[in-house]
Image (tube, rainbow, N blue to C red):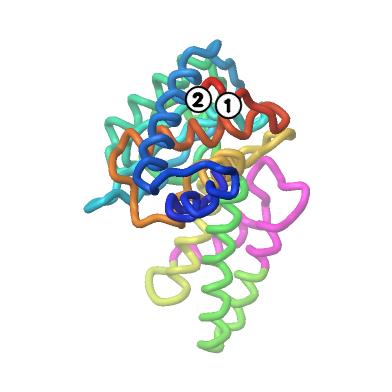
Amino acid sequence: MFGLSYRSVGKFLPLLECRGSKSSIERDVGAAGQRAKELHGQAPRMRVRVLGVDGTGAAMAGRDAGVLFFVAIGSGGGLIGVQPVHEEETGKVRRHVAKVMAQVGAEELRTDEHSVYEGIVSEGQHRLCLTHWRKSKGKRAYDLYRQAVAEDRPLEAQTMRQLLDLLRKQPRAPAVPEELSRLVMRYINARRGLPWKVNQLLQHVERTWEKVSDDPVDPTNNATERLIGLTLKIRAKTMRGFKAMHKVIGHPYLAFYLRGREGICDLRKVI
């Protein structure tokens, strides 16, 4: 749970008058993960309003695997499920997302801009993470601003500054701002060089503006990314790779279970 390697745990346990090799610890943690997964599946099915979905890579011995996380947004960020699916496996991803949406009765799907999530639900039900959208568009706008300054293109530099101001503006306008529409028309006929790059970015921002979540409670998918980090990534940083997919899947369930409710869990159910 805390990201310690099995070897480090083996060195720590004697302080608690326990003994065990790193291999036995790995085996026990894997078994506990499977029990935590079973407990999760036996719990009453969660009902959520917003379903957060995001994929991540999982290093395995000899290959890289993909894992898909399903999280309740605005409900404490609770884990709904984990599936061994890579985001590039379009058909599998869409089937799993549609299935979980129906199971939890979600009204909205919240994701990043990965094209695999498009078309699973109606356009009004699928909203983009505000944090991811602002970050990606802001980075691209800043890169073009620096290029414009380097090439002595004051108009393009000013345009990118205006775009950055619009992206950062609080509160964020739910509809496309008139200022953005004017910037789009300024470069609509650009077909080459820096103006063409500015044109492409402005049109993309305009096209996706109203797809971004404006949820007053939480317009982001941060809960999903945070849970991925706490239940899988913190562990992956201290190891070369999991040896089997069932251990990859079991670990997030175990880490989520150990965090418990208000920091309390019943260890007897998993050990």
User: x, y (%) of residue 136?
Assistant: 53, 58
Q: Residues within 10 Å of mark 2 (few under 14, many from 20)?
A: many
Q: Which mark is residue 270?
A: 2
135 drawn magenta: no
Task: Tell me the kind of residue under disc 2.
Answer: Val
Point 52% across, 41% down: residue: 18
Q: Which mark is residue 267?
A: 1
- Quadrant position of residue 78: top right
Q: Quadrant of the N terminus?
A: top right
Write down the region rendered in magenta.
162-189
Task: Tell me the kind of residue under disc 1.
Answer: Leu
Can residue 165 be seen here? The reply is yes
**Circle 2 sits in a helix, a strand or a loop, which is it?**
loop
Q: Residues within 10 Å of mark 1 (few under 14, many from 20)?
A: few
User: x, y (%) of residue 50?
Assistant: 59, 27
Q: Nearer the viewer, residue 106 or 128?
A: 106
Proximity of marks 1 and 2: CB atoms separated by less than 8 Å: yes
Q: Residue furthest left?
A: 62
